[in-house]
Structure formats: C-alpha cells, structure tokens
Image: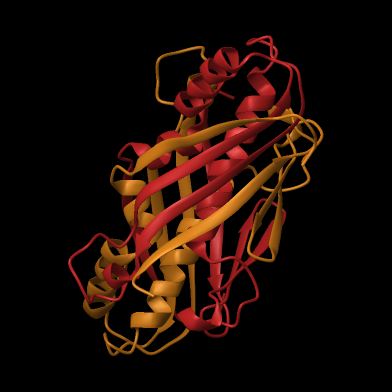
Chain colours: A orange, B red
Amino acid sequence: MPFTTFHAKAELQKGVQVKATSRNFEITVDEPKELGGTNTGMNPVELTLSALGACQAIVARVYAKKFDIDFDDLWIDVEGDLDTDGFLGKSDVRPGYSDIRFTFHIVTDAPKEKVEGFVAFIEQTCPVADTIMHPVNVSLHDIVIETDKE
Amino acid sequence: MPFTTFHAKAELQKGVQVKATSRNFEITVDEPKELGGTNTGMNPVELTLSALGACQAIVARVYAKKFDIDFDDLWIDVEGDLDTDGFLGKSDVRPGYSDIRFTFHIVTDAPKEKVEGFVAFIEQTCPVADTIMHPVNVSLHDIVIETDKE
C-alpha cells in the first residue's frame, strides 16, 4: 500500500471533550481543568507527543534487525514547549509547539556509537517526526452546514 | 500557564504495539495487520490526524461565542496522504504526510459567510494545525543505554 490516505473523525462532545475515531478505534480527548476541560483524556498537544513517541518506537522495532541491534526494552520520553498565549490570542507567538525534545531509552548490550546511528536513522525515518519537523500542506476541503444532527 | 512543557512517554510492547502515556492517561498504539501489527489501536499517523481534528473541535468550542456562532453539533473529518514507500526506504519521498485535508461539519443556523470566517480562524489558531503546517524544531535530547528494565 504505497500511497495511502488515512482517516480520522473528531466529534465535539460536551464542553471541550472530543470523541476521536479512526477505523474502529476511539479515543477520548479533553483538556485538564486549568485549560477549561473536564480532564477525561489527554489533550490534543499531548496526543501529538504520544503519536511522535509511538511512531519512533515502531520505527525502532521495524529497523532494529537492519542495524543489528538487539534490545530487551525500549521507551521514549517526549516533551514539547508551547506558549498557550498564542492560542489564547494574548501574544503573536505561534500557537503550536516551538521545540520538541525526545530522550531515547534502550536496554541493550550494543555499543553507544551503534545506538547513536540507529537513533539518527529513526529521527529521519519516522513519519510523524517528518510530519512535525517539515511543513505539511493542511487545507480546508469543505464546510458542510448540516441541517440536523448526523 | 503561558509557556508550558507538555510530556508523553511511549513504551514499546510486543511487536509494534506501543503503550503511550501522558499524565495519568494511556493509549494503545499499534499497526494494522497489513502494516505488520496486531491491530489493537490506531497507528501513529492516524493518531496524528485524531489530534488535529480534536484540536480544531476544541478551538471551535472555545471561540464560538466570540464569533457569535451558536451550534448544536460539530464534527470534523480529517484525511491525510502518506506514501509508505518513504518509511520503507523504497523511494526518496518524505516519510510523513504530504497533504492533509479537513471537512468541517456544523449544525447551525449561522450564515455560511460567518462560518467561513470562523473556520479560517480555527485553521490559523489551532495549536496542532500550526505544529503540523509549520516547521518545529524536533531534537534528540539524550540517548540513555539502560542496564536493566525500567
């Protein structure tokens, strides 16, 4: 399946809670109370970091053999800086992340230099990292004014 | 909380399954069988679209009053094009999304022109949209070679 179109749907619930679905999977997205939500799930920017870390972990699994790296365990900590004043219109800063950092943890006997090359490859090859690092053409396809609840 | 650092952790499980956590929330990420997984959750690129749609829905909720738009229901369909040959190293195309489109559905009596201005604002103000549309500095903070399982 080389050229693929992926889908998701986000349905606003009460307040700022959202039911996000893709295929048969569903996630509850919300904001913590201090950001005006009811704290029933990760918020969208935390979900974005989760997607990035998960993607890097999957790339690691898929390519470990090619890099001849055996590991017993692997996890990635991701953190991102965002100035909420941008979203709130209180300043001209961008509303999204300015910087995202990740720390790669691996339980392995492989030498550090080998792991470094592996991690550099993962950073370049991860689809979500590429999506975040480089511009993507995001566009409005249509606005549908519905006359009744779906 | 203007300048905020958000966090997530991705722990690789069996195969390409990942446990992604942020604060006290947990999501299972996986790939469908045709992409080498066991299909127990959305994959990372679907999760990215979910984060985008959820973020736009939340922005809509937060700013509806400012745009004087009353609505009974609101949902957003998101789709994104990705050439998996990039990730698989079969071609030089980027591994991430090239294009993402969204369709905005709203149950409202507001006139179309008013909704159009509202949606244009949402597109510009959404933190996840900004993160995807414009470059973000993603960097490796550290590689930790662990001697034992965390």
Q: Residue at x 49, y 33 (%)?
A: B127
Is there any visible trace of residue A77 in the rendered image? no
Position of the C terminus of chain B by quadrant: bottom right
Q: Position of residue A67 (x, y in %)?
A: 26, 85
The residue furthest front is: A147
Q: Residue at x 39, y 56 (%)?
A: B81
Q: Nearer the viewer, residue B34 or B21?
A: B34
Tell me if residue A62 comes above or below residue B135 in the rendering: below
Quadrant of the rendered image containing residue A1? bottom left
Q: Is residue A134 left or right of residue A37?
A: left
Residue at 30% from the left image edge and 62% from the top image edge = B95
Residue A13 shown left or right of residue B131 in the figure: right
Image x and y of residue A92, in percent: 40, 15
Q: Horizontal and vertical percent for residue B111?
A: 64, 13
* In-front residue for pair A134/B57: B57
Q: Position of residue A22 (x, y in %)?
A: 62, 59
Residue at far left of view: B92
Which residue is painted at 45% across and 65% down in the image? Answer: A55
Q: Is residue A68 left or right of residue A18?
A: left
Residue B140 versus residue B70 in the image, above or below: below
Task: Please identify the quadrant where the N terminus of chain B is shown.
Answer: top right
> Residue B10, can we see it?
yes
Total count of labels: 0
